[in-house]
Amino acid sequence: MKYCYWGLVFFIFMLIQVKAEDGFMKTRGVQLMLNGAPFYANGFNSYWLMYMGADPSMKNKVSSAFQQAKDHGLSMARTWAFSDGGDSPLQYSPGSYNEQMFQGLDFVISEAKKNGIMLVLSFVNNYDQYGGKKQYVNWARNQGQSISSDDEFFTNSVVKEYYKNHIKTVLTRRNSFTGVAYKDEPTIMAWELMNEPRCNSDPSGKTIQAWITEMASYVKSIDGNHLLEIGLEGFYGPSSSEKQQYNLNFQVGTDFIANNQIPGIDFATVHSYPDQWIPNSSEESQMSFLNNWLSNHIQDAQNILHKPILLAEFGKSLKTSSANQRDQLYDTVYSAIYSSAKGGGAAVGGMFWQLFTEGMDNFRDGYEVIFSENPSTASLITEQSQKINHIRKMYVRLRNMEKWKRARDVRRAEASHSGYSTGN
């Protein structure tokens, strides 16, 4: 039955197309891929989204943030999928969850989806804010575990089970607004293991290396749809000792190269805070550090890791600098990203810290960007969005042309063999 052959070829071709265009972010070499085309984007951090989304009197700020972000060409956002213990928790205690807070996260995902914004969701904090590793360690102590340091978050078996349970709970959560399980939701671009993991008690990096390996494998065992990143700031470790000079004396138990080479880690991240890391240095010194820091990490992603890199946090506080100085930092970061992205390189985008809407005075930390208050910064953000989105649209047009050509070739081949369609 020869007539079946070309029908089968066409069916397989269409099946491959559908799989490539299921809406989930993927990687190919140093590029992120969305629906078969390289994906480059401009983005932002707003850690507070779930918290606001859970409060009926404040949830309009979530909608407003996404709408304003969209209006400025932003299409990626990073936020917390955790709040452990304390006031307004997502997780009251291990395995015990606050449904109202979870519905706040449901709302965030639903609103992001409406505005065409992809999300990076983080599972836990390194720091004490919103619970963090300290809260997990305290929960284990309360169950009789003998733990001397918060760094035992990475090694204690009871703590690791608590953390894995949180991962599983988040991944299998069914959104109360969309009806879609988080692990099946394409609006989620990637999961993040931890916001800025550090393990100062083991500068060799072995503790965090083992933890990432175990947890990456666990995430992927439940969710094969989504990308995964670690949440690293980018400090170099023993695997690239010649580059530790760029760390500004930070040895925090992480290793940018070795950590990101772990199977299951799909792309690298780097954070940039010269004003925090070298606070008493001149503006020139801070900018010189930043240029080297960005250049090194983008080159390492391109040439050593062979993976995409997301500049997942950067910012400058207006409490200690002028708006013009902050704009200069944004411009430096954006230029480094564009320089790589325009050639199809590893720098896939940046996410500034952080986007606020009006009426959030209690949350201000000096790093906030409120578009209506910060017009010069807003203009820089919009300009970068336009440049990056132009790159993405160019790739989508190329992809569409390739699809059309492939479909045409299949149809021509099918037509040329139509003489065999009557069978034997």
Image: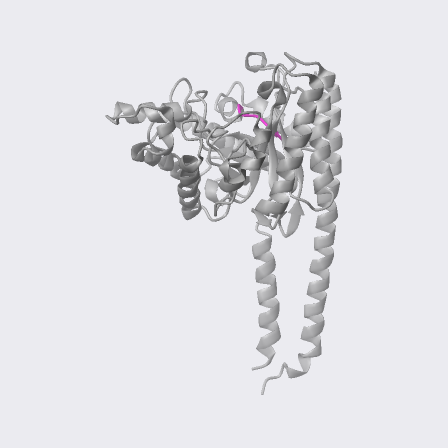
Q: How many marks?
A: 0
Residue projecting furthest to the left:
144
Residue 169 visible from this viewpoint: yes
Question: Where are the magenta residues, as a range?
Answer: 44-48
Pick the residue in front: 206 or 301: 206
Residue at horizontal 57 percent and vertical 28 percent from the top: 247
In this rendering, the answer to whether 132 lies above or below 188 is above
Magenta span includes 193? no
Q: Position of residue 91 (x, y in %)?
A: 38, 27
Residue at horizontal 38 percent and vertical 23 percent from the top: 134
Pick the residue in front: 301 or 217: 301
Q: Position of residue 401 (x, y in %)?
A: 74, 57
In this rendering, the answer to whether 110 lies above or below 137 is below
Q: Position of residue 229 (x, y in %)?
A: 52, 39
In this rendering, the answer to whether 1 lies above or below 172 is below
In the figure, is residue 387 to the left or right of 55?
right
Residue at horizontal 40 percent and vertical 38 percent from the top: 211
Residue 75 visible from this viewpoint: no
In this rendering, the answer to whether 366 lies above or below 136 is above
The quadrant of the image that shows the C terminus is bottom right
Q: Position of residue 200 (x, y in %)?
A: 44, 26
Task: Report the predominant secondary structure element of the magenta stretch.
Answer: loop
Residue projecting furthest to the front:
242
Residue at horizontal 51 percent and vertical 45 percent from the top: 261
Pick the residue in front: 358 or 146: 146
The quadrant of the image that shows the N terminus is bottom right
Residue projecting furthest to the bottom:
424
Snapshot colouring: one colour
Pick the residue in front: 171 or 307: 307
